[in-house]
């Protein structure tokens, strides 16, 4: 009986990480009072957009778009996270010529799947934490595959941080 | 059926001025700039409320296609029209397109010159539309055969709209469409 409870239908670990980071983003965005949208499929450097929801599901400004990454690797330093970003993503995130501002969000996830959630009657805790950085205006690189980008540990992608970013955007200040 | 357009080339070929003209003639008004590279347009609909659409400032922006596709999607929702209908009224040029259709008009050869303007009835974005193109020599003879035998054809070229008529400039590779059997 028990073997039937473990079907071969489970996602592979990378898909699980992707879904988990999507859920993390959804939770923070929802509590912050904004909605998530999927941008046009052609754009592979943007995973999600965050906006105010207008009438009949049409999104409204302020708007923010982001690339969402997750990792279980040991990327944490005392003060920073060093994340190896694909060159193509880096090159697109450093550009200034966009209508909607773009950031990178990295979700740090525990290595063991059983540690991802802390569950009890009182809480459902998603571990560990997401961080954000704007790479807009960073210099081009001569690297050929990856660029290690630095995210400050103080730049946690929290409800308050997202609300502050969106407020800034609505007042004309880009992240 | 609700058709969602996902072809980036179609959106890339929509001119911002055309879209702004369309929106203004449908009651949209410029409201405010959004950061450095976009503007917000609004429309007040009785009983539904105020809608908002963001337009990019110019075609060179990295998210031009995304923003235009969003705007078309929003217009389709707000106006209860299909995306294809809206795109069909906005497209004024489409370089390097292949038109599939049938020859509906072909003038007789003019003296010894084998080049005349023919009319194809072909699908442009959302519906069958007449497309005029100038064919010469062998391609003109192929067109006569296609017209008399009602054979479907393909022709590549640069589509432009002039005085509400579609013209296929620089026609190339005019040929019978072997994929269609009548």
Image: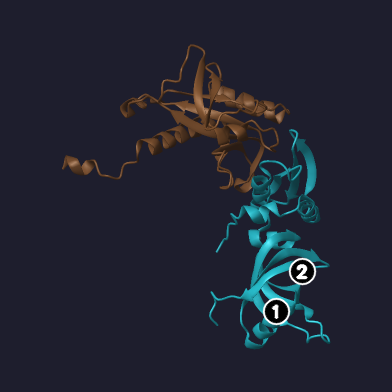
Seen in the image, is A162 located left or right of residue B171?
left
- The chain letter under disc 2 is B
- Residue at 73 percent of width and 52 percent of height: B46
A125 or B96: which is nearer to us?
B96
Determine which residue is flagged by label 1. B138
Give the vertical position of A28 relative to B42 (above or below): above
- Residue at 66 percent of width and 85 percent of height: B145
Query: Comparing marks 1 and 2, which lies closer to the viewer?
Result: 1
Give the vertical position of B136 relative to B1 (above or below): below
Colour in which chain A is drawn:
brown
Q: Is residue A86 visible?
A: yes
- Residue at 78 percent of width and 81 percent of height: B114
| Badge 2 density bin: few <14, some 14–19, many ≥20, Cα 10 Å | many
Seen in the image, is A156 located left or right of residue B21?
left
B161 or B67: which is nearer to us?
B161
Where, quadrant-wise, is the N terminus of chain B in this rendering?
Answer: bottom right
Colour in which chain B is drawn:
cyan
Residue A113: x %, y % from top left: 33, 29
**Could you say which quadrant of the image residue A99 lies in?**
top right
For the residues labelled 1 and 2, the Cα–Cα distance comes to 20 Å
Compare marks 1 and 2 and give the one earlier in the sequence. 1
Determine which residue is flagged by label 2. B167
- The chain letter under disc 1 is B
Give the vertical position of B104 relative to A112 (above or below): below
Residue A60: x %, y % from top left: 66, 40
Same chain, marks 1 and 2? yes
Give the vertical position of B27 relative to A151 (above or below): below
| Residue sitting at the far top | A78
């Amino acid at each position: 009986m028990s073997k039937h409870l473990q079907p071969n239908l489970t996602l592979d670990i990378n898909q699980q990480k992707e879904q988990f980071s999507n859920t993390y983003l959804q939770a923070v965005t929802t509590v912050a009072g904004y909605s998530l949208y999927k941008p046009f499929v052609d754009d592979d450097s943007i995973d999600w957009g965050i906006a105010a929801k207008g009438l009949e599901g049409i999104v409204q400004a302020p708007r923010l778009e982001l690339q969402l990454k997750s990792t279980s690797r040991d990327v944490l330093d005392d003060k920073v996270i060093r994340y190896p970003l694909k060159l193509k993503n880096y090159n697109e995130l450093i550009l200034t010529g966009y209508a909607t501002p773009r950031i990178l969000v990295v979700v740090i996830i525990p290595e063991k799947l059983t540690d991802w959630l802390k569950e009890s009657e009182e809480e459902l805790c998603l571990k560990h934490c997401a961080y954000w950085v704007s790479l807009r205006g960073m210099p081009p690189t001569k690297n050929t595959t990856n660029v290690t980008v630095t995210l400050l540990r103080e730049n946690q992608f929290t409800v308050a941080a997202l609300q502050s970013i969106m407020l800034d955007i609505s007042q004309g200040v880009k992240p | 059926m609700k058709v969602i357009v996902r072809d980036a080339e179609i959106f890339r070929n929509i001119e911002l001025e055309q879209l702004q003209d369309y929106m203004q003639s449908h009651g949209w008004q410029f409201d405010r700039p959004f950061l450095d590279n976009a503007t917000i347009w609004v429309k007040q609909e009785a009983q539904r409320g105020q809608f908002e659409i963001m337009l990019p400032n110019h075609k060179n922006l990295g998210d031009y296609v995304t923003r235009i596709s969003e705007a078309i999607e929003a217009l389709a929702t707000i106006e209860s029209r299909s995306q294809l209908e809206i795109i069909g009224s906005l497209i004024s040029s489409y370089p390097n397109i292949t038109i599939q259709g049938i020859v509906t008009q072909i003038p007789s050869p003019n003296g010894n010159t084998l080049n005349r303007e023919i009319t194809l009835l072909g699908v442009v974005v959302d519906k069958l539309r007449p497309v005029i193109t100038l064919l010469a020599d062998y391609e003109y003879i192929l067109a006569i055969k296609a017209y008399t035998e009602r054979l479907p054809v393909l022709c590549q070229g640069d589509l432009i709209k002039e005085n509400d008529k579609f013209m296929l400039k620089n026609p190339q590779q005019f040929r019978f469409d072997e994929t269609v059997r009548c």
